[in-house]
Amino acid sequence: MDIACDLLVLADVVVTQDDERRVIHDGAVAIHGDTITAVGTRAEIEPLANADRVLDLGAAMLLPGLVNAHSHVAMSLFRGLADDLPLMEWLSDHIWPVEKRLTPRMVHLGALLACAEMIASGTTCFSDMYLLEHEVAAAAEATGMRAVVAEGVITTPTMTYATPEEGYALIERLHRRYDGHPLVSTAVMAHAVYTTSPTMLKDSFALAGRLDAPFMLHAAESAEETRQCVEAFGMRPIAHLESLGLLSPRTTLFHCVDVTMDEIALLAERGTAVVHCPESNMKLGNGFAPVQKMLDAGVRVGLGTDGAASNNDLSMFREMGSAARIQKAYRGDPSVLNEKSVLDMATIGSAHALRLPGLGRIAAGFRADMCALDMSCPNLMPLHDPVSQAVYAATGGEVRLTMVNGRVLYMDGRFLALDHEALVEEARDVAAWVAEGGIC
């Protein structure tokens, strides 16, 4: 029986991330519209796929598109603005003051810059919490990326809403605008326990339930956050969230650095997902999340970069390498968080954290979101173990192809869905705009 196929992608190696975690040599992926219809060897698939187009990548490793499960993409505007500072000082004295001057144009520009960076490094989907989030959604649409977006919920008034009720209405409008959209979906994201009141946390969770959307927030990011939470509410952050009834399969928590074994067990019991952001955690001096313990307990863990202001890059390949290496040093055990577990986090785990079950695998019935590494790059040779090379050796600069929903967005150094030269020209205004505010 013939395979429905508009586009046949061929590559020397296909890392499927399917249930068997197959790695197929001399592989082929058949795509019909936005969906993968068949995966196997070239000899198996090519004779049955009467493809309109064939894309032969040759010496390339084809992987599922990486899913960045936590970011603040417009903060690419602030990359390098205030380095080497603790979290609270970094936020209060540097980031929040300049954020007060944000304009829709600047947020859109920052999001476009981030999308370009992610596309060029193999990320096909991102989750974002920020201000003026409609501009982030528009940037994702313009560049062809997949995104889960949410206006951040915070107790104090922002430039987009003066009261909690206005904030919820804004979130609902954004949800209605993108309901059923093929690439952009929405979530409800509260900033953190130290910036969002208990009432707003509960109301936000209820709103997520009414919209059938994910509920997400920063939690247990640092020992200082824990101290503040205990001082304010008499409980640690995870216990505080549990007391409010907010731990559930709908909930995804970002960071979870300062968590105990009892709290990890509770997260597993409640079905709450966690997104690990190792490079941001390190740069802000927040410590090392016990990720292997979470996985061992049955917690579903995804991977994210956080914002470019606290990372300072958005490469998920670099994030994978950091996640694996950090955990080995933290535990004093080179066997923990192996390369397969980390690739799971960046694909299947992140898709689960965002409640996007059609992503994270190269398998029939899944969305045609893929990336490909150039296996002729010196740092990826010789090839003994493809997954090891992807996690430990790749940086993201070796990406040849990025595809979302069956559409090629990036190929051999060229952006096919955005005007990179125009973006570069616009980006030159950013440093001057920041300096005008006297922040740097």
Image: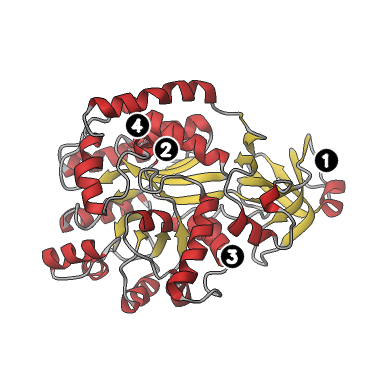
**Neighbour tally class for label 2: few under 14, some 14-19, many 20 plus, Cα within 10 Å:** some
Who's the residue at 53% across and 26% down the image?
Answer: 420
Residue 303 in the image: x percent, y percent? 46, 57
Q: Quadrant of residue 400?
A: top right
**Front residue of this view, candidates 18 and 327:** 327
**Of marks 2 and 3, which one's residue comes earlier in the chain?**
2
Secondary structure, mark 2, is helix
**Of marks 2 and 4, which one's residue comes earlier in the chain?**
4
**Front residue of this view, candidates 320 and 249:** 320
Q: Is residue 353 left or right of residue 121?
A: left
**Of marks 3 and 4, which one's residue comes earlier in the chain?**
4
Q: Which residue is mark 1?
A: 50
**Neighbour tally class for label 1: few under 14, some 14-19, many 20 plus, Cα within 10 Å:** some
Who's the residue at 31% across and 36% down the image?
Answer: 173
Q: CA distance from mark 3 to mark 1?
A: 36 Å
Residue 368 visible? The answer is: no
**Neighbour tally class for label 4: few under 14, some 14-19, many 20 plus, Cα within 10 Å:** many
Q: CA distance from mark 2 to mark 4?
A: 19 Å
Q: Is residue 58 left or right of residue 410?
A: right
- The correct choice, above or below, for 417 with respect to 313 in the image is above
- Discs 1/4, front: 4
Q: On residue 107, which mark appears? A: 4
